[in-house]
C-alpha cells in the first residue's frame, strides 16, 4: 500500500509541476499579447477584450517554484545537482537554475562544475537533456541520495592488519586446543 501511495504522490507532484509550467507558458503568451497591445496594434477579431486582461503582476514571467532549503546536502555535490533537477520535475532545470541553488546554499564549486556535472549525468543516462533543460529519468535513481535502495551492493570494509593478526592467533589457539583435547 505504501508503494502505491508513493507512486500517487510522485504523480501528483508531476501534475503540479506540469500545471505550473503551463501557467508560466500562459503568462508568457499573455505578456506577448500585452506588449502587442501596448505597441498600438489592434487585436484580431475574437481575441481578448480589455475586460478580460489580467493585472500586470500576472503578466510578469513566472519561474518554477523551488525551495532549495528542503534539499538535503550530504557532501556529494553531484548527487545534490541531480536531486535539484529531480525536484524541478516535469518543468526541468537549466544549468543556470541549478547553479543559482548552489549559490543560494553557499556551496563552493568550480566555475564550470554544474554544467560539467549535468552533462556527465546526461551522458550516463541518469538525466535527460531536452531543449537546454535537464529532466530526471523516470524510475531511476540518479545517486543514492536516501530515496531508493542502491542498485549495487555497498563496498565491503577492509580489516586492519592488526585485526587480521588477532583472528589468525585466535584460530591457531582454537585448533591447538582441539588437537590437545583429541590426544
Image: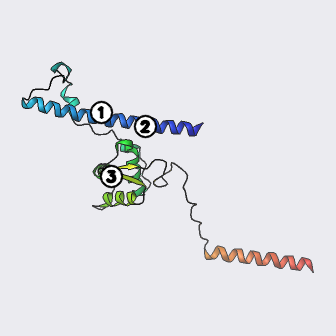
| In the foreground, 115 or 154 | 115
Upstream in the sequence, badge 3 or badge 2? 2
Upstream in the sequence, badge 1 or badge 3? 1
The quarter of the displayed image where residue 3 is located: top right
Q: State the SS at label 3.
A: helix
Q: State the SS at label 1.
A: helix
Residue occupied by mark 3 = 102
Give the CA separation, mark 1 to mark 2.
Answer: 15 Å
Residue at the farthest front position? 45
- The x, y position of residue 61, in whole percent, is 23, 37
Q: Tag 3: Cα neighbours inside 10 Å, few (<14), some, or many (≥20)?
A: some
- The x, y position of residue 167, in whole percent, is 71, 74
When the figure is inspected, residue 86 is found, relative to residue 182, above or below; the finding is above
Residue occupied by mark 1 = 23
Residue at x 49%, y 48% (from the top left corner): 139
Give the CA separation, mark 1 to mark 3.
Answer: 26 Å
Residue at x 30%, y 62% (from the top left corner): 110
Image quarter of the N terminus:
top right
Residue at x 23%, y 29% (from the top left corner): 58
User: Of circles 3 and 2, which is in front?
Assistant: 2
Q: Is residue 108 visible?
A: no
- Is there a contact, CB below 8 Å, between mark 1 and mark 2? no
Q: Tag 1: Cα neighbours inside 10 Å, few (<14), some, or many (≥20)?
A: some
Residue occupied by mark 2 = 13
Q: State the SS at label 2.
A: helix
Tally of numbered discs:
3
- Is there a contact, CB below 8 Å, between mark 1 and mark 3? no
User: Of circles 1 and 3, which is in front?
Assistant: 1
Q: Tag on residue 152?
A: none
Give the CA separation, mark 3 to mark 2.
Answer: 23 Å
Amino acid at each position: 500500500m505504501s508503494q502505491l501511495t508513493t507512486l500517487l504522490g510522485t504523480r501528483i507532484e508531476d501534475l503540479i509541476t506540469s500545471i505550473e509550467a503551463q501557467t508560466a507558458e500562459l503568462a508568457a503568451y499573455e505578456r506577448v499579447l500585452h506588449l502587442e497591445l501596448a505597441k498600438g496594434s489592434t487585436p484580431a477579431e475574437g481575441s481578448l477584450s480589455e475586460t478580460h486582461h489580467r493585472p500586470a503582476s500576472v503578466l510578469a514571467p513566472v519561474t518554477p517554484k523551488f525551495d532549495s532549503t528542503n534539499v538535503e546536502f550530504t557532501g556529494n555535490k553531484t548527487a545534490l545537482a541531480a536531486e535539484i533537477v529531480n525536484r524541478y520535475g516535469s518543468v526541468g532545470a537549466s544549468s543556470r537554475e541549478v547553479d543559482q541553488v548552489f549559490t543560494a546554499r553557499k556551496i563552493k564549486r568550480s566555475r564550470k562544475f554544474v554544467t560539467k556535472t549535468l552533462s556527465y549525468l546526461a551522458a550516463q543516462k541518469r538525466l535527460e537533456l531536452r531543449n537546454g533543460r535537464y529532466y530526471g529519468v523516470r524510475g531511476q535513481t540518479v545517486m543514492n541520495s536516501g530515496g531508493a535502495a542502491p542498485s549495487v551492493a555497498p563496498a565491503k570494509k577492509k580489516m586492519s592488519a592488526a585485526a587480521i593478526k588477532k583472528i589468525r592467533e585466535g584460530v591457531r589457539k582454537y585448533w591447538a586446543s582441539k588437537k590437545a583435547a583429541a590426544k
